[in-house]
Image (cartoon, rainbow, N blue to C red):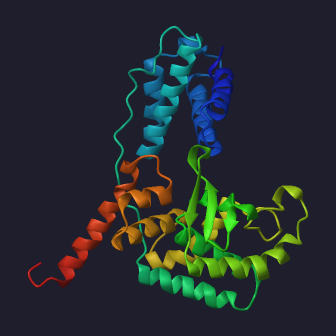
Amino acid sequence: MRIDEAADAYASHLADVRRLSPATVRAYRSDLADLATSTGPGLPLDEVDLEHLREWLWQATQRGDARSTIARRTAAARGFFSWAAEHGLIDVDPGLRLVAPKRGHPLPRVATADALAKVLDGLAAAAEGGEPIALRDHAIMEMLYGAALRVSELCGLDLDDIDRDRRTARVTGKGSKERVVPFGSPAGRALDAYLVRGRPSLAARNTAAATARAVFLGSRGGRLGARTVYDIVARTLGAAVGGTVGPHSLRHSAATHLLDGGADLRIVQEILGHASLGTTQIYTHVSSERLAATYRLAHPRA
């Protein structure tokens, strides 16, 4: 059996048994396709050895791939060959000695509360005219920040997931795990305005049943895609933080501002939907940096 043949079965295992997100499955499948190309499309699976895998990662390094990408490729290869050994497809697992590069931990880029307030106030002013796209974009930005959502969670929201009275949203995060997150009154007002005055106009442009329940719609009435959300955030928030940003910057900002305001770390973990508290702890470092910067600016003996 060749790598590409086994990789299809492994992708099904990841999706159906381990229940990884579609994005993760696609990324791992793409990594394995690249491995098959690197080793040669005709090379049998049981002839792949450690040197093949190291050569593959070296090629990625030479291309300038990020350390996080190479670490993911390492994980994909190790998981794939471990699975192949368990299912009797190979006798020796070449991934056992494959070592991922150490990943750096850069601090997330965050916007100050004041900068975000100006951006959101500007979007609110633009939405007052009642134009559907302006109403939608304002609601998107408020929900990304107010509920600390991932872009996939925002795009996957259905009307039944929103409790407008309690101001909560039921979202499906990584690993298909559901959680209920709160959002504040500014996000609630923006969402109400969009649902009442903006969404009906967009929904009338597309009658497909598959998108009839989607909260956020594109200009043609279909479910909004992640690429459009990235463009909205980059256009409206980029100037405020002084660089290229995506939807995750709003999530980073929400987590940092919660901790700055005294929120318990475990509560923030629940809101963000992190499986591990260690993932959430990076935001304590962000807050510490902001604390130190304020100290250096304000304290007489700093």
Residue displayed at 48% across by 10% down: 92
Q: Is residue 193 left or right of residue 125?
A: right
Of residues 90 and 185, the one nearer the viewer is: 185
Q: Is residue 266 left or right of residue 179?
A: left
The residue lying furthest to the right in this view is 207
Q: How many marks?
A: 0
Q: Is residue 282 left or right of residue 40?
A: left
Examine the rendered structure and indicate whether residue 97 appears above or below residue 297: above
Task: Give coordinates of residue 100: x percent, y percent.
Answer: 39, 34
Examine the rendered structure and indicate whether residue 197 appears above or below residue 144: below
The residue lying furthest to the top in this view is 91
Task: Give coordinates of residue 104: x percent, y percent.
Answer: 34, 49
**Which quarter of the rendered picture does the C terminus lie within?**
bottom left
The image quadrant that residue 232 belongs to is bottom right
Q: Is residue 268 left or right of residue 120?
A: left
The residue lying furthest to the front in this view is 166
**Which quarter of the rendered picture does the N terminus lie within?**
top right
Of residues 14 and 232, the one nearer the viewer is: 14
**Residue 64 in sight:** no
Residue displayed at 60% across by 22% down: 40
Task: Give coordinates of residue 301: x percent, y percent.
Answer: 8, 81
Examine the rendered structure and indicate whether residue 125 appears above or below residue 100: below
Of residues 4 and 80, the one nearer the viewer is: 80
Task: Give coordinates of residue 171: x percent, y percent.
Answer: 62, 57
**Residue 212 in sight:** yes
Residue displayed at 40% across by 51% down: 279
Residue displayed at 43% across by 26% down: 54
Examine the rendered structure and indicate whether residue 22 appears above or below residue 244: above
